[in-house]
Amino acid sequence: MAALAGPAAPAPASAAVRKRPMNLRDLKYLIAVAEKRHFGRAAEACHVSQPTLSGQIKRLEDQLGVAIFERTNRSVSVTPAGAEILKHARLALEQAEMIEDLAQAHSDPLAGPMRLGVIPTVSPYLMPSVLMPLRTACPAIRLVLSEEVTETLADRLKGHEIDAALLATDTDDHELETLPLFEEPFWVAFPRGHALSRLDKVMERDLQEVEMLLLTDGHCLRDQALDLCSRPARQTDSGLGDLRASSLETLLNMVAAGYGCTLMPALAVRGPWLTDMGIIARPIDSPNAKRTVRLVFRRSFPRRAALHALAGVIVLNLPNTVTPLYRVAGPVGDAR
């Protein structure tokens, strides 16, 4: 006798969950928890309640059938499977942002945020004279600044974490494009009474005999100073091997204290330290004593008009100690 067919068995809970489509909000929650390593701080960053964020991530884990985070009472860590998922989540969000950027570029390329990275030997000396003119000329551009060394900015640029960067070294990366903005000569700073003060002109050869104070590794100005002084990539032999500086301001304080000399870009020559700190600064009489500051961006970046508007504002507000290289073709802020 044939068995009677009973009611159909319910689908597994996981199968029912998988029918729910994944959305960008879920991916943003994932990335926030991975970066903050804390559900409460991630919820605060995403402007939602912690139960909402925790529940959404738990439903996503059920939907995918894997644990993305390992939770304890004191910490949150990413599982191996979660690390792979997060890679794709970041890529998906980047692609979504590119879609929005493309649409914005066609409607109003000057509207929206411009995430700009600037190296530390340019940012404090250039940006104060650019910020207000940029707001006046291009009020729709919302500038988001970050200050980091060259290698970090290049990595962030290729990772779509920033839109453009102001760098003082060239790049041969095929993914990146550059707009040369200005040529900046180097000056040498030394304390009063130093042997260099007796020279009518400071030549390149004169720098090879002085105690040259350098920035720490990672700063392009350090490498440029070593190249100009024809020295190996190490500190000088004056007993200062353990005396390093991560900022130009610290170097200038060391110069004022009589520890040696330092190389400085022309933009940094403007400042109260000339009189307040007892430092003398002179240009270097050499065609090699200069650098080119460039606006670097991804070739795929769609808002070219915004980049050219930024370049125009920068060049129009440069001091006469540098030489402009970028030619402003029309009214700054004109997106046509």
Image (spheres, grey):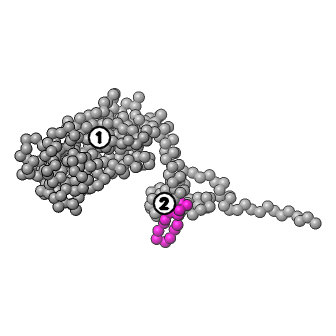
Q: Quadrant of residue 199?
A: top left
As shown in the figure, which amino acid type bears the numbered disc 1?
Val
Residue visible at 57% across and 63% down in the picture: 67
| Region rendered in magenta | 69-82
**Mark 2–mark 1 distance (CA, rounded to whole Å):** 37 Å
Residue matched to label 2:
33
Q: Which mark sits nearer the N-terminus, 2 or 1?
A: 2
Q: Please give left or right for residue 239 compared with residue 91 in the image.
A: left
Q: Quadrant of residue 253?
A: bottom left
Q: Quadrant of residue 238?
A: bottom left
Q: Is residue 18 visible?
A: yes
| Residue 15 x/y as whole percent | 68, 58
SS under mark 1:
strand
Residue visible at 23% across and 58% down in the picture: 244
Q: Please give left or right for residue 94 compared with residue 15 in the image.
A: left
Residue visible at 40% across and 34% down in the picture: 305
Residue visible at 50% across and 37% down in the picture: 103
Instruction: Tell me the quadrant of the picture where the C terminus can be found.
Output: top left
Up-down relation of residue 336 to residue 175 (above or below): above
Residue matched to label 1:
293
In this view, the residue in front, 181 or 307, is 181
SS under mark 2:
helix
| Residue 167 x/y as whole percent | 32, 44
| Residue 110 x/y as whole percent | 40, 36
Q: Is residue 146 visible?
A: no
